[in-house]
Image: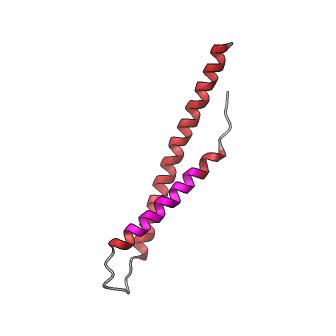
Amino acid sequence: MRRLPNPWIAIPSLGLGVLAAALAWVVASVSCDLSDPLTGCVGWSAAAALGAFGLVAIGTALVLVLVFRSIGEWQERREDSSR
């Protein structure tokens, strides 16, 4: 039986991705050398934030897809065994 994708997986994945991006931005900004204000750290902070967002959002989505798939298979087997 083919199951439809669950769109609710995107909400926690994107939320955790945004949280990880904010944390990476702050850590990269704090660790930069502020003695030279012309160069700044915006590029490094943005790169760290985008990388963290991508890794965490994809990782969370992957885990949630596997969890929902295993719960669905478990429920199908439980229904088949009760018949």
Q: Where is residue 43 in the image (x, y as percent from the top left)?
A: 42, 74
Count numbered badges in the picture. Answer: 0
Q: Which of 49 and 71 is in front in this view?
A: 71
- Prevailing SS of the magenta stretch: helix
Q: Where is residue 14 in the image (x, y as percent from the top left)?
A: 56, 55
Identity of the residue drawn at 42% across and 70% down = 45
Give the left or right position of residue 42, taking residue 57 as reference.
left
**Residue 23 painted magenta:** yes
Identity of the residue drawn at 61% across and 30% down = 72
Image quadrant containing the N terminus: top right
Identity of the residue drawn at 44% across and 59% down = 52
Q: Is residue 35 above or below residue 47?
A: below
Q: Is residue 79 above or below residue 13?
A: above
Q: Is residue 69 above or below residue 18?
A: above
Task: Classify residue 73 by image quadrant.
Answer: top right
**Residue 33 painted magenta:** no
Residue furthest to the top in view is 83
Judging from the image, the colouring scheme is secondary structure
Image quadrant containing the C terminus: top right
Give the left or right position of residue 47, taking residue 15 as reference.
left
Give the left or right position of residue 83, taking residue 71 as reference.
right
Residue segment shown in magenta: 12-27
Identity of the residue drawn at 37% across and 86% down = 37
Q: Which of 54 and 15 is in front in this view?
A: 15
